Amino acid sequence: MIKYKQNIDFKNETTNLAIGVFTDDKHPLFNQLDEAVSNELSSMLGEKLVSTKFKDITPIYSLGSIKAKKIILVGLGKREEYSVAKQRQVIGKLAKEAEEDLVLIIDTFTSRDTTSAETSTTAAEALTLATYKVDSYKTEEPNAKTITFYIYSQTDVQLAIERGVIYAEATNHARQLYNEPGNKLTATILANKVANFARHHQLEYTIIEKEEMKQRNMGGIIGVNQGSTEPPKVIVVKYQGTADFDNVTAIIGKGVTFDTGGYCLKPRTGMLGMQGDMGGAASAFGAFEAAVRLHLPVNLLLVIPTTDNMVSADAIKPGDVLHMMSGKTVEVTNTDAEGRLILADAITLAKEAGASQIIDIATLTGAIIVALGSETTGTFTNNQEFFNQFRQAAELTDEDIWQMPLFPRDQEALRKSLVADLNNSPVGKPGAIMAAAFLKEFVEDTPWIHLDIAGTSEIKTNHDLGPKGATGVMVRTITKYLENQT
């Protein structure tokens, strides 16, 4: 829980206090707190009994000199090296180590380039992200103590705190969806969750069922779903933030709730964790949630095609031909390249619904992990101006992206099928690039950004901004991009 604290009296405050300390600079509020404890803080720093090294956190007992039991000194390092990224890291670490309610004297955590309001947004975001815990199905869970964090500033930062909380809560909701087991998050359950959100916020939404998909010739998602007993869904939600529904951004997320690979079956080790193959849908929904809760003056379409990819006598086989919603035909040479098939129909649907530009996000290819590892999201585009604006947002949220190439030869490689317009996965070609090039065939000239989060959707270890597991990557970047357009 995070609350704004409007006033503070260092002598009489009973909640523990956290104060940021630079190696080469002291904030006036530090001096006030130091005076309240008879200059003991400056004495300890002068005798090097306390470290101001970045992320060194030292609790000091007040021993009755003030009413708060402890003062937490938080090392920020050198001021010139301090940044917004470091704000997130150090406050996240502080949140994870907190054992009792805490007042953050937030003005002491600002950098030269940030205001108290901006730092409060970052702090609220970091506190909420760092304290996220995975909801599990264990029958004996330890009772977790609820800690309240108070953010004190000499200026009014209430709205700034609320913004940071929304950014982080939307990310945490995406994390939780990703972490759900496949039998606990089917296409139907996912559709119901999105529908509940839409109803709560009085948004126009549609859940396209299988029969309507057939009428619309959505062969991509129908084909992927053929081997399953779970019906597919295409979820469409409209958010209108301006008087006219124009300049519409479509956010499209891949929602494969479990991916066996189909007849191109994954090995056992490759199948573990495949409940997270709907990570794109989770992040798309998270970004959409944040935009709605922030009441951004933008117009959005959320489009989530969702199904699982299973094996049965009815499942598609290598060599089968699918008729897509766009009218194009696709030879399926790899049933484990299913994400691009359902996204292609979703892209066509978004264009028909009036999308002016498209952001699609997907755990699409293992090849992007080979190229960029697990900390950088691979990004493709057909519009450099669009991408440049998006990259600025990524820099502000510290979610690393890298622009990957698309050449005319990549499109030509897809068009060499003997039996269809396109081949969904040409053998011997670069996998992440081929996946993006395939989507580009359906995007055509609509400004478009494709985010391949196969490597960045999950982290294997605990970190300053949360536990191991889902990251909710790109929720904050997409939201920041949308916010920057206002």
Image (cartoon, rainbow, N blue to C red):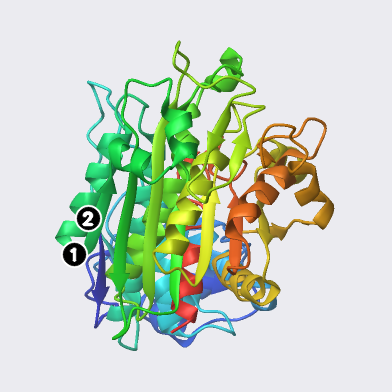
Residue 161 at least partly seen: yes
Considering the image in quadrants, where does the N terminus appear?
bottom left
- Nearer to me, 125 or 198: 198
Query: How far from the left and from the top, in percent, is residue 51?
Result: 60, 61
Q: Residues within 10 Å of mark 2 (few under 14, many from 20)?
A: some
Q: In the picture, residue 234 is in which quadrant?
A: top left
Q: Is residue 201 above or below residue 454?
A: below
Query: How far from the left and from the top, in percent, is residue 309?
Result: 47, 26
The secondary structure type at the circle numbered 2 is helix
Q: Residues within 10 Å of mark 1 (few under 14, many from 20)?
A: few
Q: Hey, which residue is sitting farthest top in the picture? A: 313
Q: Is residue 427 left or right of residue 42?
A: right
The secondary structure type at the circle numbered 1 is loop
Q: Residue at x 22, y 58 (%)?
A: 198
> In this figure, which residue is indicated by the disc labeled 1?
201
- Distance between mark 2 and mark 1 Cα atoms: 6 Å
Q: Is residue 485 above or below residue 174?
A: below
Q: Residue at x 38, y 21 (%)?
A: 228
- Nearer to me, 3 or 78: 3
Q: Which mark is residue 464?
A: none
Query: How far from the left and from the top, in percent, is residue 148?
Result: 25, 58
Q: Is residue 5 left or right of residue 175?
A: left
Q: Are marks 2 and 1 in contact (CB under 8 Å)?
A: yes
Considering the image in quadrants, where does the C terminus appear?
bottom left
Query: How far from the left and from the top, in percent, is residue 126?
Result: 43, 60
What amino acid type should be assigned to the residue bearing mark 1? His
What amino acid type should be assigned to the residue bearing mark 2? Phe
Residue 96 at least partly seen: no
> In this figure, which residue is indicated by the disc labeled 2?
197
